[in-house]
Image: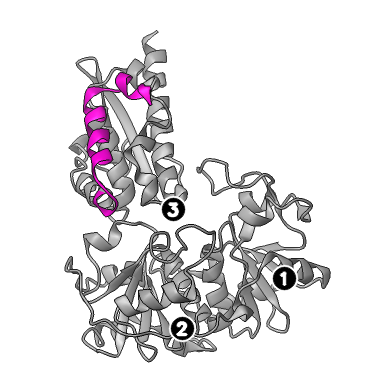
Amino acid sequence: MSASKELPERLAEIIADFKLAEGREKLELLLEYSQNLAPLPEALNHPHAPMEPVPECMTPVSVTAEIQNGGMVFYFRIPEESPTVRGYAAIIADGLKGASPEQVMNLPADFFLEMGLQQVLTPQRLNGMSAIIAHVKRLAMGILQTKN
Amino acid sequence: MSEQYVHSEYLVETDWVASHLNDPEVRLVEADEDALLYATGHIPGAAQVDWFTTLQHPVVRDFLTTTQFEELCGSLGISNQTTVVFYGDKNNWFACYSFWLFEYYGHENIRVMNGGRQKWVLENRPLTKDTPTFPRTTYKAKKPSKNIRAFREDVMKHIEKNLPLVDVRSPQEYSGELLAMPGYPQEGAQRGGHIIGAVNIPWAQAVNTETGTFKSLEELRRLYTTKGITPDKEIVAYCRIGERSSHTWFVLKYLLGYPNVKNYDGSWTEWGNLVGAPIEKGA
């Protein structure tokens, strides 16, 4: 896929790391990411924080975004008992930090397939990733619309 | 104290598990929906099975073959006599699925831990990241017990006889409004709706949300019998790929003691793609 050329730099690095990992190593790497998901800043760390739910089967995921120095920053709230989904969120939060809303909006919806997680996770589990990507793109679109 | 489940010996409580952690006759097996959860911490001594990477056939849409199942048990140190106790996340969803597969291959001493991971964690019981190793065993599986598994031909005959089916998916999947669980990409079946004649009883209604434990016998009886799912009839349960319905299968067969319940693991991803299969839409 040539699309990776247009990906934000950090995201492209993460994808390359996953590509190199083989079989179960991919899961170990995802687990590491899940453990590094940034805690919510105090202003958002309460149940009534203005965060949007990502409608997902059994894992309650909420997300919000803000602009810092022209780049996007994403915050996620995901229960500890859902490390796989926390891993997805950490990849997005880390990989897209500082990306412009245009870059986020133009992300190919299937960029993560290059990571090869489908070898170790079922489509049902990977759908969580698609849901999060679709949602951060909507957040980016919202920001662009407010600007114009 | 509420009345005991009909076959309560197939269910163990967290207390029982806590007092059998070092019992060589008992093998604890964690089966989660979340593939990484076991690695973040599990009950000391528990083995892991993953329904995708461990229990499914790598190529054909089917479970492990008899030989592959024997190899799996051997590698987990499970002998034909071992008492295998399943537990997991999300209301024991995949724990029941694994239980069903072990019964399919004729393992006799199988249990589900009531409340699963959720209850164990709520009770602040110990978790470890140490992965146990087990002395290898030689395992001999029995002939698959077809009386707990329905294939599409069985479902066709079931419909012709006007026997009850229970669709355990979400109301939106049942009505045909959605093809997969709410929020998931709508793929996997060409048609939406449910098998003609099926009633909708979402699987998680059998569980208390706060503790993850099964509802009482009285509550469960009411839940199913008021919808025509009664013990005097042959029952087929299905969902999208047969895992949520194995949970309902466990409830009907062991907690309520229905003598004749099958899980149709082809489920909606098969039926909703079968040319000419009878389907109904709407709530």
Range drawn in magenta: A1-25
Q: Is residue B108 above or below residue B150?
A: below
Q: What x and y, as percent, mark residue A22?
A: 26, 48
Q: Is residue A20 magenta?
A: yes
The picture places residue B137, in percent across and down from the top left corner, at 30, 84
Residue at the spot 72% in from the left edge and 63% down from the top edge: B198
Closer to the eye: label 3 or 2: 2
Per the model, the C-alpha gap separating discs 2 and 1 is 24 Å
| Chain for numbered disc 1 | B
Q: CA distance from mark 3 to mark 2?
A: 34 Å
Please tell me whether mark 1 sits on a helix, a strand or a loop.
Answer: helix
Q: Quadrant of residue B261?
A: bottom right
- State whether residue A60 appears in this view: no
Which amino acid, by three-letter code, is at mark 3?
A: Met
Q: CA distance from mark 1 to mark 3?
A: 31 Å
Mark drawn on residue B31: none
- Indicate which disc residue A58 carries: 3
- Asked if residue B233 shows in the view, the reply is yes
In the depicted view, which residue is nearer to us: A61 or B24?
B24
Residue at image mark 1: B154
Q: Position of residue B28 (x, y in %)?
A: 31, 78
Q: Are marks 3 and 2 in contact (CB under 8 Å)?
A: no
Q: Is residue B263 left or right of residue A106?
A: right
Kindly identify which residue carries mark 2.
B141
